[in-house]
């Protein structure tokens, strides 16, 4: 396992480099002089020269990339154009909120999605399945910002159960988590259902029945364990989605986070912030796939065996 | 036995319920900052391009201005102006200490004024040649030229007095985790774009005579939250998540009045909504087109329908409370579609079949910039429709409110919808001065006659009366050249939870500042 | 794909109850969008400020917005924007994705590796982020939105086409065609692409639903169609600040988005059943 | 009689893929159930173990009597007490019969823990003994292995160990050797036969291979397209098959001295449930088919000389 981990992490390195090149290039892909994208309009020439020197903007692109990557590796993500503050500190403020929201949404949608998927698969093609799958379809097609607004209207305004916005205390998490979680639940439920049906039709399940095991135990201890393997893989792939896709939800609920920092950065043309947010998201996505592989290996001895 | 367990469980659940329903115990309150004060990058008053209410609570000013625009002692107990206007002597209140324990002295004042020289706010002290510390508590401002407006400047939140040494030491980091003033509250924490938490300065004993409260403030702790969305802020107030909103959009006034727990109070606004017109960009190089665009704006319709009749129309650049706003009525700009159409015809822009005017085959199509806050987007869409009514096709471009300033600096705008917040006539100089093209001079207005009048108004006024006269003339001339179209003057509406907060009887000063905040308390 | 091969599954999709209902709704939305000027008594852009914030009533069935414009009229015109943006961008995306995917799957080698790496990279990023970045680079507006949505979904179609081509490529009849001296282009155009078309088109159809949501989301951020041109997302964006005063301004455009996207999904499901493509496609 | 199946019919939805099946099996006896794939052999196995609902089927008529109890009338919960305990099942493909993500030991242990009430340690000890008795080397180590680490033959021994773990009276082995290579096949068949005789178990051996039947079985039932064709003692059947289908099946066994490729296979294929022909279901493939065969199904009746037969024109010993 440690060998596998090391190899898996080493495999991530070229991917990380590729991603970092793309993110680095954003500054150069946006029309205009890269220096203009790093400073406020009307910045004095001395300041411009300082920025140019700092990013090596007069040097070949490869060198610039090297300078940038080296700084990033040392935790220097640049300075925000708008706020004049180190981007790393902005990210540091946003990240815990994103992780809290993402983690809670992930937990919520996994738990509910798996439950719904299992129930739907157990009553395949009968009314519980049809109701659940119908609900899942609706849940996955509602625009999340709209859902968020409706939830605010219903639960925060009319009923007054939860705070309307912000990130203060656990109860301010509930509505945003519900909003993101419903879409995620739909995905998890769908994958779980298919995986449960597929795993439930395998030969060994027949033999488990023939051994006289109670059906509930077979479903939950054996079939579900198999069905969870693809579910976990999908969930791991969705970590980036949870972190970044929560953009709309963070916006509607006026919550701080990586997504809203990114949007703000985009709106303000604060490219160092944009680059840093994207880099964080990319790293999250990569860690997600890594985590998915590790969990898969933990869950499936065949995968472990293939790793040696 | 069982009964006892049951009662204790009951007691526990009751106290838990009590904890849940009372978010803030003791003298703590949560305010939502005015939407146009959102996004302050730090609490450094010298470098600030925008300030918020919290500034006035961390930093005291030398002079306080009341709602009637009169000036009152604050950190300065008294002051004398030399008869020729070439020097001012300020007598500092004794015993004033910064949050870090350092005493406030005349030498500190001198150092602080020098800090302004390198900042964007240097115009505040342009007229000041130097500050001399006559003794520990006497600071003499030696002037380059007479400046009747000095007291106004010294009362503005940009001139809240910080510890200049702290700023020099901390550089760019100043005002983020630490801010050193003499105010009734200290900065506890600041999360960019989210919230600012202030705690009471227990040593405070140098309040302005305008404050009813003597000694330390009543509130122990204040949280200022920033909310970009008005609806969210309103819902938070309604559901008890916050105690007060420092600005309420007119859309919500009826709803707030309908809520039994909420109270509303209004003070005269200091804000003007207007449409800058870039005089250097086609087709607005032609004054007739500029005038037509200005006359196309139906101020009354906007006041009635966008702002629910709250506030007043704007017919020139300054708030009505300022004497300099009383220019020759014939120069005031009011809705006149017939004249607007006639002017455009005269200028050669003929109405086309699609309702858009054209000249030499070129349609009268212009860019209309606005910022992303919802009220601006809405107002801009109305302006777009009103311009369309006289045949001007305006295409809206939306910028984030914190970047639009930088965008203006490039000088490529044609029309824009924006507002300013200021209660002094020198705002005309700020927005139309020929040496500030791009931003703040969004209209790119650089007229020799205007510059002459401006110079006279800014530097040639020896007394307040003379200054009013000079500024009125300058303001009138600028308006006659149509580098802008006036739209609307709001009133400032605030709302608070009257079951929670006790507010002072009346608001001193021109907006809610630290002077008033020391009098706010929580009902026990 | 011949007309008969296309119409067959559509007909059988329409034969199911859900499919028929969904198809009917979609047809209605399209017809209404096309005939918008004939159907609407009001103009979508003429403001009438005194009529602002009217709740739904006989004169304005769905009420009016903050500028006194008829909401139903704006929703109908909004359908034009939403549908055309999503359909055009997905169509272009499908086309480009098929070309890329087919080339990668058929020729393999370096090209395949390069395409796979790029596609996998973008695929793991949420579409909304890809779209937001592109809009930031291109600038807001209808064109920017189209490009952003098109690119955001490109990875999906490329992946799918490549996978389809890879499975069919090794089949005997392809070998036979190759041994008979057929050119690569001929094999691709005649054998591989037509066989890969079904699943990709279904995926495209389902993605159109997602694209409508994406367009609405960009509109909600103020990055989509610019005023006074209505789009469902932009309508909700301006309504979000008026949640209290006039909830119908966000309610009805949201309903329009939801019902249309649900209809697209139901119809897509019915088509999947009719074409007998595994439901796994959804997870692909 | 340990197991007595009377006139059993199985329905899946509207179709009846198995009808009128009757079998009898006693302790220590080995009954071979033979037929080509699709003839309904596996359905029989599922019907006897009450597992038909798993594939959406049900017993539409007839009875399965085990040790005097009609299993078809037993509630599912009681039936579970039989499964794995008294009636054990050895499935077709050992490659897929084991849960790939569970350790071997745990998969075997569970039977004894569930049915015999043994504790963790006792169950494991029993498993190790059982594996050793099946001549599985390093039984203790194997317990900690995962299925993918074992060979096919080894896996099938594990499946057999699982079947034996509940100390059953009846083992149903559904094509236990199909997926294995020839030498391993022989070992497994031999092992099963030995177990039945040593432990006095009833063994229902389902196979398509007459050769396997010849090796170990006492009695044979030949199934074709969901109906029994012939049941008899093994010796008699091979000596003189009465049903043309039986003869054809016997003809499929490769024998020493036969030229390679000279298998006399049966032309055509077993019809699917939806296309069962009228009359005798074998008639389209039968060389002896005549008008009565098309008109009506032959009755399944006792024939002189022992056994039961369903054929209008049975083969005489001379024909064989």
Image (cartoon, rainbow, N blue to C red):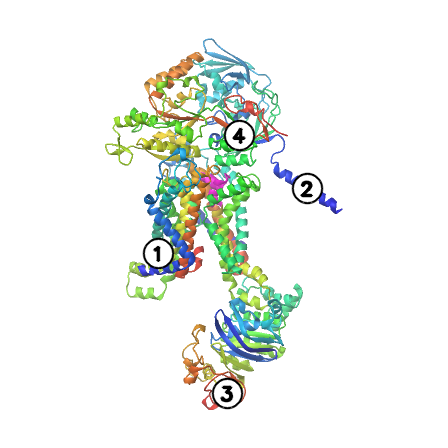
Expressed as whole percent of the image width and height from the top left, the position of residue D286 reads 42, 82
Question: Magenta segment, which residues?
Answer: A243-263
Q: SS for tag 4?
A: strand
Q: Kindly identify which numbered label has been placed on residue B12.
A: 2
Chain letter of the residue carrying label 3: D
Q: Which residue is mark 4?
A: B495
In the image, which disc is placed on residue C102?
1
The label nearer to you, 2 versus 4, is 4
Label 1 crowd bin: few (<14), some (14–19), many (20+), radius 10 Å:
many
Q: Are marks 4 and 3 on the same chain?
A: no
Q: Nearer the viewer, residue B21 or B478?
A: B21
Which quadrant, please, contains the N terminus of chain C? bottom left
Of residues B274 and A206, the one drawn nearer to the viewer in this rendering? B274
- The residue shown at (50%, 85%) is D238
Q: Identify the residue shown where x is 49% and y is 59%.
A: A194
Q: Chain of mark 4?
A: B
**Which chain does tag 2 point to?**
B
Q: Is residue A35 visible?
A: no
Q: Outermost residue, bottom direction?
A: D318
- Determine if marks 1 and 2 fall on one subunit: no
Where A210 sits versus B389, above or below? below
Mark 2 or 3: the one toward you: 2
């Amino acid at each position: 396992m440690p060998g596998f981990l090391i190899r898996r992490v080493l495999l991530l390195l070229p991917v990380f480099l590729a991603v970092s090149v793309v993110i680095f290039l954003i500054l150069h892909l946006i029309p205009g002089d890269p220096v203009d994208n790093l400073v406020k309009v009307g910045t004095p020439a001395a300041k411009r020269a300082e920025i140019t020197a700092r990013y090596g903007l007069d040097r070949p692109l490869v060198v610039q990339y090297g300078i940038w990557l080296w700084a990033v590796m040392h935790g220097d993500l640049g300075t925000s154009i708008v706020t004049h503050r180190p981007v790393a500190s902005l990210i540091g403020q946003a990240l815990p909120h994103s992780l809290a929201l993402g983690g809670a949404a992930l937990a919520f949608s996994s738990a509910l999605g798996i439950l719904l998927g299992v129930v739907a698969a157990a009553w395949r093609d009968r009314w519980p399945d049809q109701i659940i799958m119908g609900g899942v379809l609706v849940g996955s097609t509602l625009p999340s910002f709209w859902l968020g607004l409706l939830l605010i209207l219903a639960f925060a305004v009319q009923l007054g159960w939860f705070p309307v916005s912000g990130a203060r205390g656990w109860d301010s998490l509930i509505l945003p988590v519900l909003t993101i979680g419903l879409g995620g639940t739909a995905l998890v439920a769908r994958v779980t259902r298919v995986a449960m049906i597929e795993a439930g039709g395998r030969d060994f399940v027949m033999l488990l029945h023939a051994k006289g095991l109670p059906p509930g135990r077979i479903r939950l201890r054996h079939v579900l364990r198999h069905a969870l393997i693809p579910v976990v893989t999908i969930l791991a792939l969705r970590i980036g989605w949870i972190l970044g896709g929560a953009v709309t939800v963070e916006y509607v609920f006026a919550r701080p986070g990586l997504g809203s920092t990114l949007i703000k950065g985009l709106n303000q043309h604060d490219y160092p912030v944009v680059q840093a947010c994207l880099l964080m998201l990319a790293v999250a996505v990569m860690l997600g796939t890594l985590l998915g592989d590790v969990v898969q290996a933990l869950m499936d001895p065949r995968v472990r065996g293939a790793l040696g | 036995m069982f009964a006892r367990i049951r009662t204790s469980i009951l007691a526990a659940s009751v106290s838990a319920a009590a904890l849940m329903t009372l978010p803030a115990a003791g003298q703590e309150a949560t305010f939502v900052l005015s939407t146009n004060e959102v996004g302050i990058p730090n609490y450094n008053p010298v470098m600030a391009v925008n300030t918020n209410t919290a500034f006035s609570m961390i930093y005291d000013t030398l002079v306080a201005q009341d709602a009637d625009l009169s000036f009152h002692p604050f950190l300065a107990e008294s002051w004398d102006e030399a008869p020729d206007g070439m020097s001012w002597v300020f007598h500092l209140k004794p015993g004033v200490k910064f949050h870090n324990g350092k005493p406030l002295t005349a030498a500190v004042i001198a150092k602080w004024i020098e800090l302004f020289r390198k900042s964007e706010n240097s115009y505040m002290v342009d007229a000041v040649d130097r500050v001399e510390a006559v003794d520990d508590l006497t600071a003499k401002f030696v002037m380059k030229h007479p400046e009747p407006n000095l007291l106004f400047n010294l009362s503005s939140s940009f001139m809240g007095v910080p510890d200049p040494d702290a700023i020099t030491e901390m550089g760019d980091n100043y005002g983020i985790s630490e801010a050193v003033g003499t105010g009734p509250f200290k900065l506890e924490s600041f999360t960019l774009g989210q919230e600012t938490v202030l705690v009471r300065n227990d040593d405070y004993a140098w309040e302005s005579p305008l404050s009813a409260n003597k000694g330390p403030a009543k509130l122990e702790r204040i949280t200022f939250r920033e909310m970009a969305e008005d609806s969210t802020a309103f819902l938070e107030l309604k559901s008890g998540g916050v105690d007060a909103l420092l600005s309420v959009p007119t859309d919500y006034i009826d709803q707030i009045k309908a809520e039994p727990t909420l109270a509303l109070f209004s003070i005269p606004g200091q804000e003007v909504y207007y449409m800058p017109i870039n005089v250097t960009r086609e087709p607005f190089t032609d004054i007739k087109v500029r005038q037509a665009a200005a006359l196309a704006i139906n101020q009354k319709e906007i006041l009635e329908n966008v702002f629910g009749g709250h506030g007043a129309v704007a017919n020139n650049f300054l708030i009505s409370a300022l004497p300099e706003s009383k220019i020759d009525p014939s120069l005031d700009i009011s809705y006149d579609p017939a004249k607007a159409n006639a002017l455009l015809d005269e200028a050669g822009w003929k109405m086309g079949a699609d309702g858009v005017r054209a000249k030499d085959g070129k349609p009268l199509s212009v860019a209309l910039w606005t910022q992303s806050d919802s009220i601006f987007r809405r107002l801009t869409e109305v302006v777009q429709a009103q311009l369309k009514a006289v045949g001007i096709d305006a295409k809206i471009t939306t910028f984030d409110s914190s970047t639009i300033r930088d965008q203006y600096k490039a000088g490529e705008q044609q029309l824009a919808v924006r507002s300013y917040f200021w209660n002094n006539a020198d705002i005309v100089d700020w927005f139309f001065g020929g040496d500030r093209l791009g931003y703040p001079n969004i209209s790119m207005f650089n007229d020799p006659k205007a510059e002459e009048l401006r110079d006279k108004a800014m530097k040639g006024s020896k007394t307040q009366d003379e200054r009013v006269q000079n500024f009125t003339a300058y303001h009138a001339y600028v308006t006659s050249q149509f580098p802008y179209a006036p739209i609307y003057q709001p009133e400032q509406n605030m709302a608070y939870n009257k079951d929670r907060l006790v507010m002072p009887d009346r608001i001193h000063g021109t907006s809610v500042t630290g002077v008033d905040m020391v009098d706010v308390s929580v009902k026990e | 794909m011949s007309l008969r091969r296309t119409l067959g599954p559509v007909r059988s999709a329409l034969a199911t109850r859900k499919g028929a209902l969904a198809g009917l709704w979609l047809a209605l939305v399209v017809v209404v969008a096309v005939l918008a000027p004939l159907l609407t008594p009001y103009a979508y852009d003429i403001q009438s400020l005194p009529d602002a914030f009217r709740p739904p009533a006989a004169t304005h069935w769905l009420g009016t917005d903050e500028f006194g414009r008829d909401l139903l009229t704006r929703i109908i015109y909004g359908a034009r924007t939403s549908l055309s943006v999503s359909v055009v961008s997905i169509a272009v995306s499908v086309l480009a994705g098929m070309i890329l995917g087919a080339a990668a799957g058929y020729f393999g080698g370096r090209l395949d590796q390069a395409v796979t790496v790029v596609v996998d990279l973008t695929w793991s990023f949420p579409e909304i982020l890809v779209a937001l970045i592109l809009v930031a680079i291109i600038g807001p507006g209808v064109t920017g939105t189209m490009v952003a949505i098109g690119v955001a979904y490109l990875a999906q179609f490329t992946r799918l086409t490549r996978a389809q081509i890879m499975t069919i490529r090794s089949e005997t009849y392809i070998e036979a065609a190759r041994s008979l001296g057929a050119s690569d282009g001929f094999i691709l155009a005649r054998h591989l692409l037509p066989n890969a078309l079904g699943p990709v088109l279904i995926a495209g159809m389902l993605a159109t639903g997602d694209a409508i949501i994406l367009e609405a989301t960009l509109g909600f951020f103020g990055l989509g169609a610019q005023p006074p041109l209505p789009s469902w997302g932009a309508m909700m964006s301006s309504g979000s600040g008026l949640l209290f005063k006039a909830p119908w301004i966000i309610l009805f455009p949201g309903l329009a988005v939801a019902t249309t996207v649900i209809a697209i999904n139901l119809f897509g499901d019915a088509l999947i059943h009719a074409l007998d493509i595994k439901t796994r496609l959804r997870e692909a | 009689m340990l197991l007595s199946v009377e006139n059993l019919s199985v329905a899946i939805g509207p179709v009846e893929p198995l009808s009128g099946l009757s079998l009898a099996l006693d302790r220590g006896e080995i009954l071979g159930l033979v037929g080509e794939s699709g003839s309904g052999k596996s359905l029989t196995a599922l019907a006897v173990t009450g597992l038909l609902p798993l594939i959406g089927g049900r017993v539409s008529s007839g009875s399965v009597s085990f040790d005097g109890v009609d299993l078809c009338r037993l509630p599912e919960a009681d039936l579970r007490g039989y499964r794995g305990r008294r009636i054990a099942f050895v499935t077709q493909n050992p490659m897929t019969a084991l849960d790939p993500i569970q350790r071997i030991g745990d998969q075997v242990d569970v039977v004894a823990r569930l049915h015999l009430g043994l504790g963790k340690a006792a169950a494991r000890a029993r498993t190790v003994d059982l594996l050793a008795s099946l001549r599985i080397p390093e039984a203790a180590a194997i317990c900690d292995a995962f299925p993918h680490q074992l060979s096919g033959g080894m896996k099938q021994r594990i499946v057999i160990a699982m079947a034996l773990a509940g100390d059953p009276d009846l083992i149903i082995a559904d094509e236990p050797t199909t997926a294995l290579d020839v030498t391993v096949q022989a070992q497994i068949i031999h092992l099963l036969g030995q177990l039945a005789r040593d432990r006095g178990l009833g063994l229902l051996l389902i196979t398509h291979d007459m050769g396997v039947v010849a090796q170990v079985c006492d009695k044979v039932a030949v199934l074709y397209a969901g109906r029994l064709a012939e049941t008899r003692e093994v010796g008699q059947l091979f000596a003189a098959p009465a049903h043309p289908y039986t003869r054809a099946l016997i003809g499929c066994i490769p024998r020493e001295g036969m030229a390679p490729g000279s298998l006399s296979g049966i032309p055509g294929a077993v019809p699917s449930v939806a296309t069962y022909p009228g009359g005798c279901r074998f008639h389209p493939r039968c060389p002896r088919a005549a008008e009565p065969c098309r008109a009506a199904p032959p009755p399944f009746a006792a024939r002189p000389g022992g056994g039961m037969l369903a054929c209008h024109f049975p083969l005489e010993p001379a024909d064989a």
